[in-house]
Amino acid sequence: MKRFRFFEIFQSNPDGSLSPRRVVSINGVTFGPGVAFSRGVLFGGVNLFDYYELDIAVEEENNIYVIKGFYKKQ
């Protein structure tokens, strides 16, 4: 498992939305660059805006970053 900073995986867009920098999967929901989402939008039951200051636990499978969890603030 690899550890990434949130903004290594996602980017903040000028309108305040987020977009993945590469194809990611969360709880079986897969999406990639070009997808923009705002606060309150859930992917695999996860609102990513709740975690944007945290590091992300990732496993890579077939060129997809599978998000396994988020690290707590220390």
Image (cartoon, helix red, strand yellow):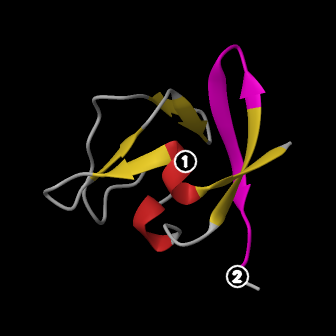
> Which secondary structure lies at badge 1?
helix
Question: Does residue 45 show up?
Answer: no
Residue furthest bottom in the image: 74
* Circles 1 and 2: CB atoms closer than 8 Å: no
Question: Does residue 59 show up?
Answer: yes
Which residue appears at 77% of the width and 86% of the height?
A: 74
User: Which part of the image, by quadrant, shows the N terminus?
Assistant: top right
Disc tally is 2
How would you rate the neighbour count of disc 2 (Cα within 10 Å): few for under 14, some for 14-19, many for 20 or more? few
Point out the stretch of residues depicted in magenta: 60-72
Left/right of residue 17 with respect to residue 72 in the rendered view: left
Left/right of residue 13 with respect to residue 29 in the rendered view: left
How would you rate the neighbour count of disc 1 (Cα within 10 Å): few for under 14, some for 14-19, many for 20 or more? few
Question: Closer to the camera: disc 1 or disc 2?
Answer: 1
**Which residue in the structure is indicated by mark 2?**
73
Kind of residue at disc 2 = Lys
Q: Does the magenta run of residues contain 64?
A: yes
Q: Quadrant of residue 16?
A: bottom left
Left/right of residue 8 with respect to residue 33 in the rendered view: right
**Which residue in the structure is indicated by mark 1?**
8
Which secondary structure type mostly characterizes the magenta part of the structure? strand
Q: Position of residue 68 (x, y in %)?
A: 73, 48
Which residue appears at 40% of the width and 54% of the height?
A: 42
Q: CA distance from mark 1 to mark 2?
A: 17 Å
